[in-house]
Amino acid sequence: MGEHTTAEKNGKYISTVEIKQVQSENRVYNVLLDIRYTGNGKTVVKKTRLNRKTQVIEVELDFKPDRLELDPDNFLLFRLVDDKEG
């Protein structure tokens, strides 16, 4: 997962996250991914379609998320790689 940011706009929060498919083969997977957003005592799960090597996902929320979780129920098998770790 790349960088995650949140910006306030008109009383709502826009959460932006970059997701990269980094498998060694050239294939691009087409999958439906759940993303769980948590913050201010609230939780919401949003579904998004991944179908490119690199995608920027923007979601409008009623609260400022302090945490997001990709595939919280482990429907997909993948390894999370943090760009900041090198």
Image: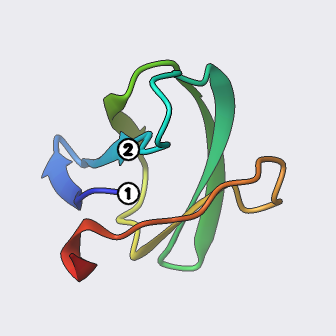
The residue furthest front is: 25
Numbered disc 2: secondary structure: strand
Q: Earlier in the sequence, mark 1 or mark 2?
A: 1
Marks 1 and 2 close (CB-CB < 8 Å) = yes
Along the line of sight, the residue nearer the viewer: 41 or 21: 21
Q: Position of residue 7 (x, y in %)?
A: 16, 53
Along the line of sight, the residue nearer the viewer: 16 or 18: 18
Q: In screen coordinates, is 10 left or right of 59? A: left
Along the line of sight, the residue nearer the viewer: 62 or 45: 45
Q: Residue at x 35, y 65 (%)?
A: 64
Amino acid type, callout 2: Ile
Numbered disc 1: secondary structure: loop
Quarter of the image that includes the N terminus: bottom left
Residue at numbered disc 2? 19
Q: CA distance from mark 1 to mark 2?
A: 5 Å
Disc 1 crowd rating (10 Å Cα; few below 14, some 14-19, many 20+) is some
Amino acid type, callout 1: Met
Q: In screen coordinates, is 27 left or right of 16? A: right
Q: Residue at x 28, y 56 (%)?
A: 2
Res. 1 mark: 1
Q: Residue at x 25, y 66 (%)?
A: 83
Q: Position of residue 66 (x, y in %)?
A: 39, 76
- Give the colouring mode of the picture: rainbow
Q: In screen coordinates, is 83 left or right of 40? A: left
